[in-house]
Structure formats: C-alpha cells, structure tokens
Amino acid sequence: MNPGKFTFNSFLTGHNIRISPEVKHSCLEGLKIMRKSRDQMHDDRHVLGILKNLGKFMDESREINWSKINYELLLLSICWHDVWKSGRVLNSGHKALYHQFYEGLGSMRVFGKLTKYHSLDKKLVRKVKYSIRKHSMFQFLPTRNTETKILKDLDRLEEWSIPRLRWALGAISDWHTMSPRLVNVGKFYFEHWMLPRHTKKNYFQWTTGRINFKKPAYSREVRRLLHEFARKNFNLLPRPSLSIERQTIYPESEE
Ligand SMILES: [Fe+2]
Ligand SMILES: [Fe+2]
C-alpha cells in the first residue's frame, strides 16, 4: 500500500480509533458504493475529504471532548450519508431543490435496507439513520447529537473545496453546455445559501474558521467559472475542454 495514501484504514490508525469489525465492514461497504457514484460531487473522494477534515478537526480543536464521541455512529454516518445521491445525476435545475430536500431521507433508506445484512446493533442503526436524515439541507427541528453536528459541519466545509468543484465539472465532457438554468441554480445557491449561511451558522468555531479561510479563493474560482460559462455561451467562442483527472484522494493541500 502506498504509505502516503489517505484511506479509511489510515484514518483509523492515524487517530487511534477503534470500531467493531462489523461497523468497519459496513463503513467500507458504504465507501464502495460511493466509489461507483454517478455524481462526481458525491463520491468516495467526498467521503475521504470529510474524513481528512475530521482528522484536522480532531488535531486542532478542543471545542469537542473527542473521547466522548461515538465513532461508530460518526463514521457510519459519514460513509453512508450521500449514498442516495451517488446513484443520481443532477442534470437539471428542477431536480436541484428536490435533491437537496430528499437526499437525507433517501440515503437513510438505502442505509437501512443494505445494512440489514451487516449485523449491526439496532440502536446504533437507529442513531445513524437519524444522523443521515438530518444532514440534508431543510431541517426544522434542532439537531440532537454532537456526531450529527460534526457531520453537518464537515459536509458544509467540503462544499468549499476547489478541487472538488473542478473535478465535478471536469467529469462532464463539455461543462460549458450545461443547462443555464442549472448554472443559475448553482449561482443562487452559492450567493444566497453558502455565502450567508456557511460562513456564520455552523455548529463549531473551527468550521467557521476553515470556511472563512477558504472563502476568498473559492469565490474567485466561482466567479471565474461563471465568467467562462457566460463567455462561451454568449460569444460562441471555441470551447476548450476542462480535463481533470480523477484522483482517488484529495491533494495534500488545496490552499
Ligand atoms: Fe448530502
Ligand atoms: Fe455530503
């Protein structure tokens, strides 16, 4: 195994986390599904990105008493939270809202169905289902446990990853021909949700600090991409393809 490669196992050993063989097996099953994802924004790289940030969070912050965390709950929730999205391609603006609304429930159901064969503790399964359901965007009741709050914060932080944005676009053979309505939905989401909410309304200070750090570069990248999209579509200039190789892990540093 490549010694520098970040994997689920290297995360566990690097942070001295012990989980039962059944939970580990189930986490790896979730990752396997994510690896075959049809949605490049929500694949195994996204899950590994969350785990990488979780490692940083644990190393850098004392906001949480890490010895009290239920890692079986947290890791299962991280590995399975986007399995529903992994089976779908978002190709129209109409679907975007539905995806954001339904994804938590959808992934919760997939998890429930597939983990029947993983001999997991029933109470744990119930808790993971709750976490997965709660991670999606529109929630009206407060979030109950710390593990779910960690998942939500780290999932938000991942949205500010420039490599993730680039490889998602790079996976579309000619992203400039994307539906302008979908591009507008993305723009609206960035301006009216990510910018005002993600930079303030996180559960943990550490997340807010990381997002504020990433915000300038990410905003510049979004502006550049929107400009490029408008230029290609409205001036009908030649369209160079944005070719970005699929990587199995995040680059060591994206800042
Ligand atoms: Fe999600
Ligand atoms: Fe996610």
Image: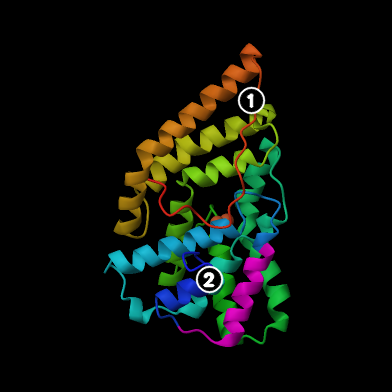
Residue 132 % position (x, y): 57, 66
Most distant residue in the left direction:
62
Q: CA distance from mark 1 to mark 2?
A: 36 Å
Q: Is residue 70 left or right of residue 31?
A: left
| Above or below for 108 versus 139 | below
Q: Is residue 14 magenta?
A: no
Q: Which image quarter holds the N terminus?
A: bottom right
Q: Which image quarter holds the C terminus?
A: top left
Residue flagged by tag 1: what amino acid is it? Answer: Pro
Please report the bounds of the magenta region as a residue range: 18-33
Q: Is residue 23 magenta?
A: yes
Task: Mark yes or no: residue 153 visible.
Answer: yes
Crowd tier of the residue under label 1, counting other residues whose Cα lies within 10 Å: few below 14, some 14–19, many 20 or above: few
Residue 128 % position (x, y): 56, 74
**Label located before the other in sequence (1 or 2):** 2
Q: Is residue 40 left or right of residue 75?
A: right
Disc 1, SS: loop
Mark 2 sits on what residue? 8
Assign the magenta stretch its main secondary structure: helix
Residue 85 image label: none
Q: Is residue 148 left or right of residue 207?
A: right
Residue flagged by tag 2: what amino acid is it? Answer: Phe
Residue 240 image label: 1
Residue 196 % position (x, y): 39, 41
Applied colour scheme:
rainbow
At 60% across and 41% down in the image, what residue appears?
244
Q: Quadrant of ligand 2?
A: bottom right
Most distant residue in the front direction:
2
